[in-house]
Image (tube, rainbow, N blue to C red):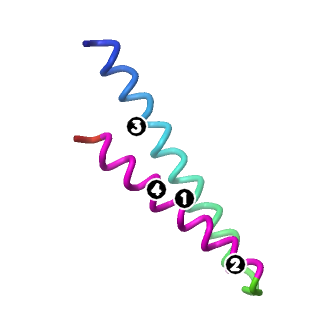
Amino acid sequence: METTDLVLAILHHLLVFSLAGIIGAEFVLIRGELPAATIRRLIGIDRHYGILAGLITSSMG
């Protein structure tokens, strides 16, 4: 039981830190101009943001 809790806690923290990294990447990308290529990149990053947010909320339950 303790091993499972430890693994889930580590996974949860990795997901949260990854989410923070994604938010940082989005801030860097929106600083400059937004040509079509940058907007497409932001769409992909937002997709990963949504996936990670869903995984984080499911790991809390």
Of the numbered discs 2 and 3, the one sitting upstream in the chain is 3
Of the numbered discs 1 and 3, the one sitting upstream in the chain is 3
User: Of helix, strand and loop, which one carries label 3?
Assistant: helix
From the image, tell me which residue sits under label 4: 51
Q: Quadrant of the C terminus?
A: top left
Q: Residues within 10 Å of mark 3 (few under 14, many from 20)?
A: some
Q: Residues within 10 Å of mark 1 (few under 14, many from 20)?
A: some
Q: Which residues are magenta?
A: 37-59
Q: Quadrant of the N terminus?
A: top left
User: Of helix, strand and loop, which one carries label 1?
Assistant: helix
Report if the CB atoms under discs 4 and 3 are less than 8 Å apart.
no
From the image, tell me which residue sits under label 3: 12
Q: Residues within 10 Å of mark 4 (few under 14, many from 20)?
A: few
Of the numbered discs 2 and 1, the one sitting upstream in the chain is 2
Residue sticking out furthest to the top: 2
From the image, tell me which residue sits under label 1: 48
From the image, tell me which residue sits under label 2: 31
Residue sticking out furthest to the left: 61
